[in-house]
Amino acid sequence: MSDQIYLDYNATCPLKPEVFDAMTAIMQEPHNASSVHQTGRAANMLVEKAREQIAALANAPTNQVIFNSGATEGNNTVIQHFKDEPILVSATEHDAVLKADDDLIHIPVDENGLVKLDEFEALLKQHKPALVSVMMVNNESGVIQPIAEISALTHKHGALFHCDAVQAAGRIEIDMPALGIDFLTLSAHKFGGPQGVGALVLGLCGVTPTLLQGGGQEKSARAGTENVAGIVGFGKAAELAKANIDAFTSRTRAFQEKLEETLKAFQGIHIYGQDVNRAANTTLFSINGLSSETLLMAFDLDGIAVSNGSACSSGKVEPSHVLKAMGASDEAASGAIRISTGWKTEDADIEAFLKVWHKLYERMKDKIHA
């Protein structure tokens, strides 16, 4: 990594050393888990071990884990399977859900980004959907949805429930049976694994959505040669994430509290979701009168990597649809900054951010209004 202070873990997380070691130990081998010879059988054993590690992270049966290229593929796989029937999704979903189909019905959220359960149930009665999709932890605000309540309402009205858990893995406990999740999507690079590998984890609903056709890999649920080294790294990252959730939460909560206590002292600052349950590593705030683009460029020039929310728009800085759904003004939605911490973050990084923030505030304070 460069000398830049990295505070954008929700976009992608640095590869953990143990994951790097596990991957490099096998990367030079010609692993194809579908081959029947000795080398192929060795590759298959590696894949199956990783499948056990992912299943443990989600508290799911091992044979219900389907490896793929990441959560975008997983989300599209589920949404496309039900595309000819009504689908309800929360208005604050990632674009990997929102853009997976043109006819999705949006569930409104309140000012904190939480699904409005009364309005959600009214939509269930009105549209009788086949599928509901609500993410566990929002990628921009860190707000944690009441998944058990949402899934219970979903099942009460005869629909199946999909949950994008990309930002939950390694940050909070995931228990698919307890939460009533039928389809769960994960990406390795969000919690210290490699990019380009993820999983769709199935509940016990008896439905296996399939997007890619071809070979018989993943029991014909996902065609394509398995990325064995990536899957091994994914499994190792999942094992580490599950073992270290409490320590991760404690450490990042301390960073979050220090950041937010300092930011609250400045005029015009609004921190989103601060009154509800959030992931400990995420702070999303806006300041009236300043744009995200201006702030991101200024932070970058001072050696600080932060984000304006989702990092999946080809580098474009756009108003946050998450904040718009939460009732924020156009100005606020265009001026949001997200700080997300992780396993390599140190207290000195937070101090450096706050030092730069003080400097930028003094430089731009004439543009700020309450």
Image (tube, grey):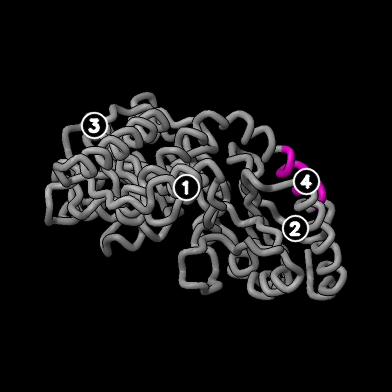
Q: Earlier in the sequence, mark 2 or mark 1?
A: 1
- Give the spatial CA distance, label 1 vs label 3: 21 Å
Q: Which mark is residue 193?
A: 1
Q: Earlier in the sequence, mark 4 or mark 3?
A: 3
- Give the spatial CA distance, label 2 vs label 3: 48 Å
Secondary structure of residue under mark 2: strand
> Which label sits in the foreground, 2 or 1?
1
- Give the spatial CA distance, label 2 vs label 4: 22 Å
Q: Main secondary structure of the magenta part?
A: helix
Q: Earlier in the sequence, mark 4 or mark 1?
A: 1
Neighbour class for label 2 at 10 Å: few (<14), some, many (≥20)? some
The stretch in magenta equals 254-262
- Give the percent coordinates (x, y) of residue 194: 45, 52
The C terminus lies in quadrant? bottom right
- Name the residue carrying label 3: 63
> Which label sits in the foreground, 4 or 1?
1
> Which label sits in the foreground, 2 or 4?
4
Amino acid at pointer 1: Gly
**Which residue is nearer to you in this view: 329 or 49?**
49
Secondary structure of residue under mark 1: loop
